[in-house]
C-alpha cells in the first residue's frame, strides 16, 4: 500500500494536484478542507464547529480533525493507498496519524511539499475567492492569518518528516501541468510496488 502526504502553504496547489495523483496512482484522496466544507454545506454539528475556525483562517482543533480523518480511513479499507491533502497540519496530527496507521499495519511512504512563494499564493487565493464563495479566500487579513497558522503550527512538520527521511520538496510554481509532471517523476523515482 502506498500512502502519501501532500504538504504546502494555503493555496500551494495540494487540492489541484491531488486530483491527478490520486487518478494515476489509484489512491483514495482525503482532503480535510473538503471534508469540513462538505459538513458545512450539510449544516452538521461538525460543520458548524469547523466553520467558526475556518472563517477566521484558523486551524480546526486537532481532536476533531484527527477523529474525522480516522473515520475516513476506516470507511475505505478497500483502497490501494491514501493521499492525504491538508493533513497533518500540526505535530499532534502527524503523531496521531503515524500511530493510527501503525495500528492497522500501514505507514506514510513519503511527504511531498509544494514550494510556492507567498506573493504568488495570495494572487491564486484571491483569484479563487472570486468564484469559490469561500469566505477565507476573500479577505486579505484571513489569508494572512492562514499563512501565520502555517508558519506557527504546520511548517515544523517538515523537520518531523525529514527526521524520518520521508520529506521531499517539489517546485510548486509554473503551470499545473508542469507541476504534475514534476510530481509524477518524483513518485516514480520511489520505485514503490
Ligand atoms: P484547505 O482546503 O486545505 O485549503 P488550501 O490550503 O487553501 O488549499 P490547497 O493547497 O489545496 O490549494 P488549491 O489546490 O485549492 O484548507 C482550508 C481550511 O480548512 C484551513 O485554513 C483550515 O481552517 C481547515 N483545515 C483543513 N485541514 C485542516 C487540518 N488538517 N487541521 C486543521 N484545520 C484544517 O489551490 C489554490 C488555488 O490556486 C486554486 O484556485 C487553484 O485553481 C489555483 N492553482 C493551483 N495550482 C496552480 C498553478 N500552478 N498556477 C496557478 N494557479 C494554481
Image: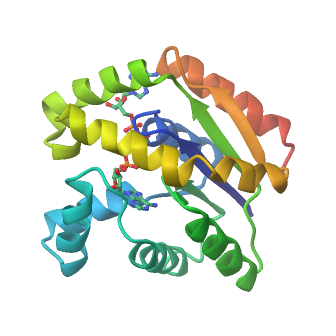
Q: How is the image coloured?
A: rainbow
Relative placement, left or right, of 80 versus 192 is left
Q: Could you say where residue 113 lies in the image, as x and y percent from the top left?
A: 63, 38
Residue 143 image offset from top left, x and y in percent: 29, 37
Up the image or down, 113 lies above or below 27; here it is above
Instruction: Please state the quadrant of the image where ligand 1 appears.
Output: top left
Residue under the point 32% across and 55% down? 58
Foreground pick, 176 / 91: 91
Q: Quadrant of residue 190?
A: top right
**Percent x, y of residue 12:** 47, 33
Question: Residue 60 appears at what percent x and percent y?
Answer: 35, 65
Task: State whether residue 47 is above or below residue 122.
Answer: below
Whether residue 83 is visible, yes or no, is: yes
Q: Quadrant of residue 115?
A: top right
Q: Nearer the viewer, residue 189 or 171?
A: 171
**187 sits left or right of 156 in the view:** right
The relative height of residue 172 versus residue 94 in the rendered view (above or below) is above
Q: Which residue is at 42% across, 49% downward?
A: 149
Q: Residue at x 25, y 76 (%)?
A: 46
Left or right of 182 in this view: 134: left
Going by the picture, which residue comes out furthest to the bottom? Answer: 103
Tell me the quarter of the picture where residue 179 sits. top right
Task: Kindly tell me whether residue 134 is visible in this rendering.
Answer: no
Q: Is residue 4 above or below residue 144?
A: below
For the point 44% across and 79% down, which residue is it?
Answer: 63
Task: Please identify the quadrant where the N terminus is shown.
Answer: bottom right
Nearer the observer, 193 or 99: 99
Count the marks: 0
Amino acid at each position: 500500500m502506498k500512502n502519501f502526504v501532500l504538504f504546502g502553504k494555503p493555496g500551494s496547489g495540494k487540492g489541484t494536484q491531488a486530483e491527478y495523483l490520486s487518478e494515476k496512482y489509484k489512491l483514495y484522496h482525503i482532503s480535510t478542507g473538503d471534508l469540513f466544507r462538505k459538513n458545512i454545506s450539510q449544516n452538521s454539528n461538525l460543520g458548524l464547529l469547523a466553520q467558526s475556525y475556518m472563517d477566521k483562517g484558523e486551524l480546526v482543533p486537532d481532536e476533531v480533525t484527527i477523529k474525522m480523518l480516522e473515520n475516513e480511513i476506516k470507511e475505505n479499507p478497500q483502497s490501494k493507498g491514501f493521499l492525504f491533502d491538508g493533513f497533518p497540519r500540526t505535530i499532534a496530527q502527524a503523531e496521531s496519524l503515524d500511530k493510527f496507521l501503525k495500528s492497522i499495519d500501514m505507514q506514510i511512504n513519503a511527504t511531498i511539499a509544494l514550494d510556492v512563494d507567498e506573493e504568488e499564493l495570495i494572487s491564486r487565493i484571491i483569484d479563487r475567492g472570486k468564484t469559490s464563495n469561500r469566505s477565507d479566500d476573500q479577505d486579505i487579513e484571513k489569508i494572512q492569518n492562514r499563512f501565520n497558522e502555517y508558519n506557527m503550527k504546520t511548517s515544523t512538520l517538515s523537520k518531523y518528516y525529514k527526521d524520518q527521511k520521508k520529506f521531499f520538496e517539489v517546485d510548486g510554481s509554473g503551470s499545473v501541468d508542469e507541476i504534475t509532471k514534476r510530481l509524477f517523476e518524483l513518485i516514480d523515482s520511489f520505485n514503490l510496488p
